Amino acid sequence: MQLFGTYYDGLTADPRAVSCTIQGTEASGFLEVTDLELDHMVAHWPQDSLLPVPGRKGELRLASSRAPAGARIVFADRETAARARRELPVLARHRKRHTGRQFRVIGLSTMAMASVVLAYIYGIPLLAGQIVGLIPPDMETRFGDKVVIQMASALEDTGGLRQCDPDPESLANQAIGRFTRAALEGTDAPFDVSVQVVANKIPNAFALPGGRAFYFQGLLDKTESADEFAGVMAHEIGHVVHRDGMQQLIATAGTGLLVGFVLGDITGLSVAGTVGAALINTSFSRDAERQADRFALEVAKRRAFQPTGLADLLERVSKDDASAQIFALLSTHPLTQERRAALEGISPMAVATVPAFSQEEWQAIKAMCLGSGAGKSKNKNKAIRGD
Amino acid sequence: MAEQATASFIGSRWRLAGILISGYILMLPTLGIYRFWQVTQKRRFYWSHTEIDGDGLEYTGTAIQLLVGFLFALAIFLPLYGFFFYLSTQSPEALVYGYTGAALLLFFLSGYAIYRARRFRLTRTLWRGIRFHQSGSAWAYAFRRILWFAVTVATAGLAYPFMAASLWKYRYNNTWYGDRRFSFEGSWRTIAAPFYVVYFLVAGLTVAITIAVSTGSGLELGSQQISSEALVGILSVALAIIVLFSYFYLLSRFTSRLLSKVTAGAASLKVRVRARSLFWQYFFYALLVLFAVTAFLLAVGFVLQGVLEPMLADQEIELSEILQVGWYNLVMLGLLYLAFMALLTVLSETILGLGFWRLVARGTIVENSDSLKSVRAGGEESPLAGEGLADALNVGGY
């Protein structure tokens, strides 16, 4: 049987019209190639050396392990190609082996990728803590100062981070300072922790790297008792003690790298990259929240306040209205049933004897932002410098 | 004997769309790994359906080579990534210098990556059983590119034709088909006319608009008086039209003229790509994108409505429930987003990518094609692994 096709010898760029005949069996047979113009045999490929190479659908391109790398026999005609495939069973076997190999490589590399992702998701919270331990505290403080500047300008629309009562000697600031020192007792926090009440309308509170925590006026307005205030304070101080801000930063950097790894876009600028990274980071921050809650519980044991106040406040803020401001709070302090249960788990009153805040102190704190209408611009810089 | 050979492209858009879509679907369960197989299939499609003088091209690269190349690129990128992270913790001034430096470094590296990726593709391209390859140094090319880029910026773009000619020369004088070396016979004059005409037209109009705006004076044409606002309006519309159409005009002239200066021994290319054909392709593409975006927004609207309405109706719903549903929604929205991006890529690849390739192939004539029959094999497959950096920097075209 003759199969007409084109032969390239892989040595010169001269395509030859050829007829091929299949000789003998699969194990010992040959594919004989005869040049139609010259009328003599130009190639003699053993059947078991034949390799199908990818080409157009329908066409058959053959290479041989015994011929130069570029040498090809091409059957462009569909019918001829189909006939050659039938006559040369070695091709189907090759194809099968090749497909199997591709599947194995894809499977293995997917598994490798999955293990990197899993190791990352479970490993980074542990690792970030270790890495943070290596960062000198004063470097973190300097970095924190830069973050405060960035945050202040990002929140400018709702009031920035201007301190409500810049006088460190006022009753309210004294009380906050005392509570902070008491909460830090027995911990090895490497910073001077400062908690500031700032005139910003958003109901929120957060801690930044370097020991700077902020309690927003918007949240203070909704805070109904000293217990609630103390709960949130203790929670934020917990973030400072665990250096969560810095840990999160390191985790975020790692997340960006991982997402880039999966999506093949190392610059991480695509929206898919950003969303993916945000999803992973949210799960990290939930772990950090649980830890800060546990810290608040410990403080509550010593300082006589109801830690459930924290949960009460979060619930109240989130129930008020489904506005965008609330999502801001939920994103950093997501409230779950589990968290509430954990906070209710211990009755601290039995242990502590000194109340967190006296009645006068709490009244003074509650009134901190009421007299701050004047001197807005004057105090702004102070708050940023953090005195 | 002067033989003329033509080129052609016979691949169908639907087959390409099939390759791309099945590739995107398989990327989900393989966590993105499948993209190397998708790219390889895409190239096999383009190469095998391109015929020069009746013989098709063959792409001999494999997905595994690309995968390994990507891993190599990671090794280069990890320290860079660490540097960026360190940079982000620095003061604002350091940040400005740092990011400028980083942008320049990335631009330099992308030049290196482009050249290496080109070598990878050329050495995996077979025509008539003979391999293409590329000599020259990727670092030298990257230096040349960044220096010319600096000169072009310093001359407000006037040096662009010189840059294009220099880079084309370096690329093609280092391109080989077997033992036959290509050569770029052009100079800055090759594209000077179309470039400077458009350049001075746009510059002139911009200056005229600036003057009209700043002086607020109108124009007197004989007895007719044109107010300042009307003048600015007319000039702005003219500028917008010129900028829009000059894109197609320049793309067609640059492609045609530069490629027509490429020779390989006695053989030479003659390429003609019409601006008109390019315009219709982009027009068709814009229509489809408009349609796709509308359909996508409607779909998102339906999903959100279906989820939010029952929630708003039930005031007593627990907060934690909303949060859980929110997670589900986020994942759904994420998938929807990925699907949308995939759709856009499929559209641009099947309409613009394939369209441009086909226009170039169909507009190409090889003069003295018979002289190519004496070419002998030469050159190895190199680099052995992937396009690494190019893949990571996203500079790869087809």
Image (cartoon, coloured by chain):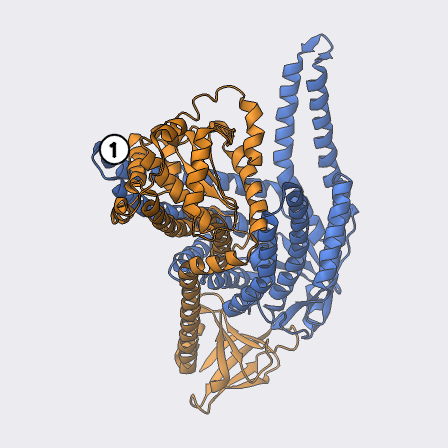
Chain rendered orange: A
> Relative to residue A31, is residue A62 depicted above or below?
above
Residue lying at 77% horizontally and 40% vertically, measured from the top left: B158
Locate the C terminus of chain B and report the quarter of the image it occupies. Answer: bottom right
> Is residue B305 rendered to the left or right of residue B245?
left
The chain letter for the residue carrying disc 1 is B
Tell me where residue B326 sits by quadrant. Answer: top left
Q: Colour of chain B?
A: blue
Residue B248 vs residue B133, the one in the foreground: B133
Residue A269 vs residue A300, the one in the foreground: A300
Could you tell me if residue A272 is visible in this image?
A: no
List the single residue furthest toward the bottom: A28
> Relative to residue A328, is residue A77 depicted above or below?
below
- Residue B196, given in percent of the width and then of the height, sits at 75, 38
Q: How many marks?
A: 1
Where does label 1 land, which residue?
Answer: B312
